[in-house]
Image (tube, rainbow, N blue to C red):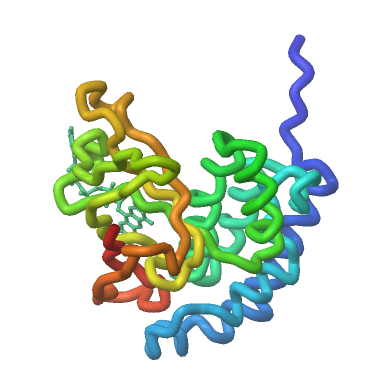
Amino acid sequence: MSNVNYFLTEEQQMIVDLVRQITDEKIIPVRAKLDETEEFPWDIMKDLAQADLFGLYIPEEYGGLGGGCFENCLAVEQMARGCIAITTTFAASALGGYPIYLYGSDEQKERYLPEIAEGKRLVAFGLTEASAGSDAAAIKTTAVQDGDYWVLNGTKQWITSGGEAEIYTIIAMTDKAKGARGASAFIVEKGDEGFSFGKKEKKMGLSSWVMALVLL
Ligand SMILES: Cc1cc2nc3c(=O)[nH]c(=O)nc-3n(C[C@H](O)[C@H](O)[C@H](O)COP(=O)(O)OP(=O)(O)OC[C@H]3O[C@@H](n4cnc5c(N)ncnc54)[C@H](O)[C@@H]3O)c2cc1C
């Protein structure tokens, strides 16, 4: 007989209750206005940061709550009841931050994770290109080592929070001959030399969900 607990722990239930409350009190009242004005939901991001939600999946040693993907999903599920645009802005931040937590060096984790957990700096994830969506291995962005630096060249499109986020996890090819295995992830920061942003995409709705071209 297996001994599986199908129910949420007390801590997980607290996350559900907290996000449900934030959704009702903070998100639902402003979602229509944000959609109209196409404004990035910075005020809501601050509310989510204050509630420590950006640190749900980040270990306690880096200032997070020490949960995982499941805890993040619980938050996303509740938030999505209120506004998909805001939810995806929040969720894409974990998409960019998770690779740093999973595969970053100790130095990178120490440098980036505490500020991400605190919600001080928003993260984005840049994989998609004009000719590479589902077929992620078709990306054309390259990364070439030049002394102590890596030089990245390429254009990413439809990047959630592009231009608004400060930290970007960017996927680039380091060895094309290896196909999908020749791709690597790089941390790029807003303000890095040669790093800029193109036009924001106009969508049919969910307008406070900003997505933009990212140029390397
Ligand atoms: C609002 C929004 C936000 C986004 N944010 C980000 C982001 O933050 N970062 C990022 O990197 N990307 C982002 N993307 C890009 C997203 O990840 C891509 O749109 C997705 O990977 C699909 O790629 P595509 O749009 O090129 O579609 P395609 O890959 O061209 O697919 C088109 C259709 O063909 C189908 N298809 C594709 N290949 C096959 C196959 N082999 N067999 C059968 N069917 C197939 C697909 O299921 C789909 O229905 C975002 C996209 C949107 C719309």
Taking the view exactly as shown, the residue that stands out farthest to the left is 131
Q: Nearer the viewer, residue 57 or 196?
A: 196
Query: Which residue, as the protein is rendered here, is positioned at the far front?
Result: 147
Does 5 appear above or below 136? above
Depth check, front residue: 14 or 208: 208
Q: Quadrant of the C terminus?
A: bottom left
Q: Position of residue 65 (x, y in %)?
A: 77, 50
The image quadrant of residue 70 is top right
Quadrant hosting residue 109: top right
Image position of 30 (left or right of 176): right
Quarter of the figure that contains the N terminus: top right
- In percent of width and height, residue 158 lies at 29, 61
Residue 117: x %, y % from top left: 68, 57
| Quadrant in which residue 23 is drawn | bottom right
Which residue is located at x 54 percent, y 71 percent?
A: 82
Can residue 203 be spotted in the picture? Answer: no
Residue at x 42% of width, y 53% of height: 125
Visible in this render: residue 67?
A: yes
Residue drawn at the location 69% of the way across and 51% of the way down: 56
In this view, 77 is above or below 199: above
54 left or right of 133 in image: right
